[in-house]
């Protein structure tokens, strides 16, 4: 694990998550004391008090829990301007205790909706991801299409 | 009930003009001084008598920097409430606690912003604290995360999308009666709202608050002293801050996800004050984004996800006759945005009877802090009759 996080901010206990992605693995923090999944990762399990935090490999599949189609970003994310509009989501991981992870939804799929099933692939480090390998998500082809009609489907 | 109930009151309010962001002729420090001196004059107090300074968010104009300009005789208390707009009522609460505990007598709560002396608020406010999980994945802290939460509120919980426009329209409606409002003279039509570009779906441009240059301040003293001063006191009845066990900084793994953090705080406020949402005459609801203000109304018990479509209608949200008028100076969206501080001044005006959109006989005036902050706060002000 890099001695210094590439992004300063948040809790900062998720170094092994990024190291795992670099190695082609998708791992989520889990307390070794009580087996509770920890998202976000922390330095101590608030449930049982253990300091022994492990990282379990899980399937790169999930369910869209919430999403937005981004049409503008602040200067903080100026490297993403060329990709606008793009869709981001919170992806729920039932196989990791329902942990929710933010991520980019590839393309602009017509079946974008809460509840859609997604599969992740690892995208190599880029400038716009601040040098981190990231998990990006694609809606499964057989996921039920959105039934809503309205402006967000334009 | 808390011993803090009614122990302190706001006796002075002051603000500078609200300038378009980046256009203030004055630096942040001078803006802060102008608002604080205006608040002291409003109260009939000598600014040198202020002995406590409280702010929130990324405020950099500290009491120790201001004191030479104010002639401060003694700085006895200074503090900063954690988090962003979520810290506003908490800052008022810290001031009241300092007075109640005998640590200061005249405490100012203030916020000053000028992009020319600092940076875009949306950048400054996050204080380099956006978690890597978001930043690496194209998500900046506040806007996009709020948009996702609102999308789930609409798509999964069935809150009508129209409630967002009602929040925006309430602000613009009130701003037309407030000549100091940035949105004065520019009413918002339904067509203009609908036609405005998306920023982050489901938010249109008009669902997002402005950023302005300017400063605003309120001064608190003990209830006993307040009765000797020239303004009608706005007593602080309750002002809880905090986060319940499943909230806090959890990178959007908090529960319930669509709550904006006020469920337990509101319960504390109703318990500590002895009043409930049905008693509130008027409310200032911090709207960084309209959908988050809808969440604030639900969390406080003004409506539920099921009744939001009926309760959050424009007619019901405007003074003088609406059931629960909100953002009566125009709110962050149409009055102007000094990181939400203007909402405190308007809550106080309603108790004084001096709002440009006065709710007749208002006695209980609420002000909710920034929704969705990992620690937030909410406040209930009351007139003498509510004590």
Image: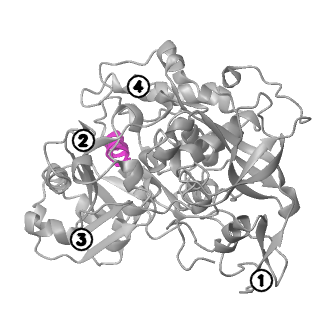
Pinpoint residue B82: horizontal percent, then vertical percent: 44, 66
Residue B316 position by quadrant: top right
The residue at 58%/62% (across/down) is B132
Q: Which mark is residue B172?
A: 4
Q: Indicate whether residue B182 is drawn in magenta.
A: no
Disc 1 secondary structure class:
loop
Q: Which mark is residue B22?
A: 2
Q: CA distance from mark 1 to mark 3?
A: 44 Å
Residue A153 position by quadrant: top right
Q: How many marks?
A: 4
Tag nearer the camera, 1 or 3: 1
Question: Which residues are the magenta region?
Answer: B340-351
Please give left or right for residue B344 compared with residue B86 in the image: left
Pinpoint residue B57: horizontal percent, then vertical percent: 39, 60
Residue B236 visible in the displayed image:
yes
Q: Chain of mark 2?
A: B
Residue B266 visible in the displayed image:
no
Q: Are marks 2 and 4 on the same chain?
A: yes
Q: CA distance from mark 3 to mark 4?
A: 38 Å
Q: Chain of mark 4?
A: B
Q: Dot 1: few (<14), some (14–19), or many (≥20) neighbours within 10 Å? A: few
In the rendered structure, which disc, 3 or 2, sits on the residue that comes first in sequence? 2
For the residue pair B136 and B55, the one nearer the viewer reads as: B136
Pinpoint residue B274: horizontal percent, then vertical percent: 55, 56
In the rendered structure, which disc, 3 or 4, sits on the residue that comes first in sequence? 3
Q: Are marks 3 and 2 on the same chain?
A: yes
For the residue pair B78 and A53, the one nearer the viewer reads as: A53
**Residue ID for mark 3:** B105
For the residue pair B256 and A99, the one nearer the viewer reads as: A99
**Residue ID for mark 1:** A48
């Amino acid at each position: 694990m890099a001695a210094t996080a590439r992004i300063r901010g948040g809790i900062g206990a998720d170094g092994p998550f990024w190291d795992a992605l670099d190695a082609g693995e998708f791992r989520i923090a889990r307390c070794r004391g009580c087996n509770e999944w920890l998202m976000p990762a922390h330095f101590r399990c608030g449930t049982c008090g253990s300091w022994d935090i492990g990282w379990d490999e899980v399937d790169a599949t999930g369910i869209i829990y919430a999403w937005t189609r981004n049409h503008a970003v602040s200067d903080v994310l100026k490297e993403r301007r060329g990709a606008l509009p793009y869709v981001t989501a919170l992806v729920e991981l039932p196989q990791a205790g329902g942990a929710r992870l933010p991520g980019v939804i590839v393309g602009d799929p017509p079946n974008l909706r809460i509840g859609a099933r997604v599969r992740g692939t690892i995208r190599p480090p880029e400038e716009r991801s601040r040098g981190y390998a990231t998990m990006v998500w694609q809606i499964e082809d057989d996921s039920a299409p959105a039934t809503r009609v309205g402006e967000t489907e334009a | 009930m808390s011993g803090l109930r009614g122990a302190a009151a706001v006796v002075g309010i002051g603000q500078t003009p609200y300038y378009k962001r980046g256009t203030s002729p004055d630096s942040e420090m001078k803006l802060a001084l102008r608002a604080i001196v205006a608040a002291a004059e409003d109260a009939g107090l000598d600014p040198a008598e202020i002995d406590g300074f409280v702010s929130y968010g990324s405020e950099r104009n500290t009491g120790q920097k201001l004191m030479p300009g104010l002639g401060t005789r003694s700085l006895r208390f200074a503090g900063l409430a954690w988090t962003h707009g979520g810290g506003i009522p908490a800052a008022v609460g810290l001031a009241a606690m300092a007075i109640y505990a005998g640590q200061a007598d005249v405490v100012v709560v203030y916020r000053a912003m000028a992009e020319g002396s600092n940076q875009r608020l949306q950048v400054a406010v996050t204080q380099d604290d956006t978690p890597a999980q978001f930043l690496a994945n194209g998500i900046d802290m506040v806007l996009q995360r709020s948009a996702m939460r609102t999308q789930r509120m609409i798509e999964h919980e069935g809150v009508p999308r129209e409630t967002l426009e009602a929040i925006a329209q309430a602000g613009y409606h009130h701003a037309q009666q407030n000549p100091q409002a940035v949105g004065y003279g520019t009413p918002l039509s339904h067509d203009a709202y609908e036609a405005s570009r998306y920023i982050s779906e489901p938010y249109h441009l008009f669902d997002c608050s402005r950023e302005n240059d300017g400063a605003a301040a309120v001064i608190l003293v003990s209830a006993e002293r307040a009765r000797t001063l020239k303004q009608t006191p706005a007593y602080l009845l309750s002002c809880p801050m905090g986060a319940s066990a499943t909230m806090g900084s959890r990178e959007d793994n908090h529960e319930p996800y669509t709550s904006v953090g006020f469920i337990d705080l509101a319960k504390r406020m109703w318990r500590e004050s002895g009043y409930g949402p049905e008693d509130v005459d008027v409310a200032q609801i911090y709207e960084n984004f309209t959908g988050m203000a809808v969440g604030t109304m639900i969390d406080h018990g003004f409506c539920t996800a099921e009744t939001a479509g009926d309760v959050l209608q424009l007619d019901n949200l405007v003074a003088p006759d609406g059931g629960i008028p909100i953002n009566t100076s125009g709110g962050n969206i149409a009055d102007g945005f000094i990181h939400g501080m203007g909402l405190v001044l308007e809550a106080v005006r309603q108790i004084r009877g001096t709002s440009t959109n006065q709710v007749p006989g208002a006695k209980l005036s609420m002000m909710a802090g920034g929704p969705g902050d990992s620690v937030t706060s909410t406040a209930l002000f009351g007139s003498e009759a509510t004590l």
